[in-house]
Image (cartoon, coloured by chain):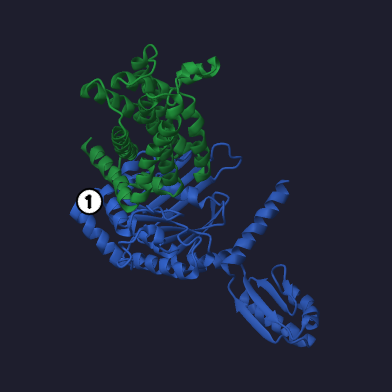
Amino acid sequence: MTAVLGETWVLARRELTHWRQQPAGVIINWLFTVMVALMFGGLFGGAIGDDYFDYLMPGMFALAMFFGVEATMTAVSSDAAKGVTDRFRSLPIHSASVVLGRCLADLMNSAVGLVVLVGAAAALGWRWQEGLGRALAAFGLLLLLRFALLWVGIFLGLVVKGPESVTMVQILVWPVGFLSGVFVDPATMPTWLGTIAQWNPLSATAAASRELFGNPGLIPDHAMLLAVLWPLLLTAIFLPLSVHRYRRLGS
Amino acid sequence: MAEPAISADGIRKTYRGAQTPALDGFDLEVPRGTVYGLLGPNGAGKTTAVRILATLMRLDAGRAVVAGHDVSTQAAQVRQRIGLVGQYAAVDEILSGRQNLVLFGRLNHLGRTRAATRADELLQRFGLAEAGGKPVAKYSGGMRRRLDLAASLIVSPEVLFVDEPTTGLDPQGRQEVWSALRELVAGGTTILLTTQYLEEADQLANRIAMLWHGRVVSEGTPDELKATIGDDWIDLAFADADQARLALPTVAAHADGEPRTEEHRISVPVRQRTKALIAISTALAADGVEPVEVNLRRPTLDEVFLDLHRKQGDKQEVAA
């Protein structure tokens, strides 16, 4: 067990070293969500309403977690394509360490990204209204979503063939992001679209965060429960799939 | 007799969805301390064999023992004793050479200080000390492969698998990798080297197994292989193509196979080199068609492969 923890930390540190070696890449990634938030909050806010920025921000936090899928997938598929995964597999380390190292590194990356985004939002006047405790609970839910999406990213990274398919997922990220309660209330959409958007896991986390932060927006029933259940369900599906896929590397 | 470093017994492996097996009764025995060349064209099963022996892939049937441990049931023990250099330099491109070696040292359970000293030793040894701080993305192909080699030598492995180490390298890079490999050999590591370059196997390996359609079809020292598989060849050059045409029937009469002609040159396989040489010379002298040049030589490994190819083709025709 200590061996696994040690190996996990060594592998997570590898990612942290990546940040140091190529700071521009990670920083741009962190600032990218800030830019999206500014674009939508600033440009659409005026047309939609005064409290749109406060409505938008919890959604943006959830979207930032969702963007992480792409980073995880890119890292996993490039390690596999370049033979780095094979080298890890030929080393006397636990296979769990390879995956857990990736998890830890990506969670840290998303946590920093979230801090940057929250900082920017606060600078522009966004506030949590219900006290620190509930705010921390909201951040917990956001990172729970990120944890679940890690497994989606790892699975996709092991399935896709090469960097070309990464581009496709990068494009698909957008419709999935828009078809949710991130930017606008699904109740304002045509019924059938609204229903799909309502069931989007991003919507649950966004709505529950709005409730915990005390930000405006209609909170659907069971938002909190769904914000916990969705990530658990995603993990229950994609964690075994990832493990299966990882094992199949050897068949 | 000492236990071999690698022994494979009747390994079979068919990839999911594939029509034909990648390995079809693969047998191999590699004595300790040898450099063993696994030679074969693309698709012969070289990489599959290495991946199975290095525990990266499961075998369907058969048994393989590497460094005294079964690859199927004792993979963890095998992994502690092997190094793997894959077809692509499997190093982290964003990290520097030194950071890569420290990372792999730590993953081999070296302490922080030990991993750092070991990294410096290896950088020195593989001529990368100066480039050690640069990101690998800025390395040349030859430097990457050397770093890859260094990474697999962090804890001196008993058996080192080197899969097509010079594929895609320029001649300069190839020389660099060869000299790095030669140094290892001098250190006594057992190396299983796969290659599709005949010259490479000839240059580096003590023994060679020729892999063809997932099976070892021939095994021995490079010279033995050439002697057993192919006949010797006599190359004759004549003053012009007409002379060669005149000489051909006489030469063919003394050959042990189909002669090959090219303009003013004739090449023929012969079983008994000296006898054939004398017979052909005498007969040609009697005909009054004297060659301007006569050469007696062993077959090149290229010809050995062509020969295998032809035999395989014959078999398929018979089967059809």
Q: Residue furthest top?
A: A221
How many residues crowd around disc 1 within 10 Å: few (fewer than 14), some, or many (20 or more)? some
Identify which residue is drawn at 23% across, 35% down. A1
Q: Residue A101 in the image: x percent, y percent?
A: 31, 39
Q: Determine the colour of chain A.
A: green
Please name the residue that numbered disc 1 is placed on: B110
Q: Is residue B315 visible?
A: yes
**Relative height, residue B112 to residue A216 (above, below):** below
Q: Residue B230 in the image: x percent, y percent?
A: 60, 66
Identify which residue is drawn at 35% across, 68% down. B183
**Which of A204 and B12 lies nearest the eye of the viewer?**
A204
Query: Horizontally, is B281 left or right of A153 in the view?
Result: right
The answer to which image quadrant residue B149 occupies is bottom left
Q: Which three-letter amino acid code belongs to the residue tagged 1?
A: Leu
Q: Secondary structure beneath disc 1?
A: loop
**Which of B192 and A154 lies nearest the eye of the viewer?**
A154
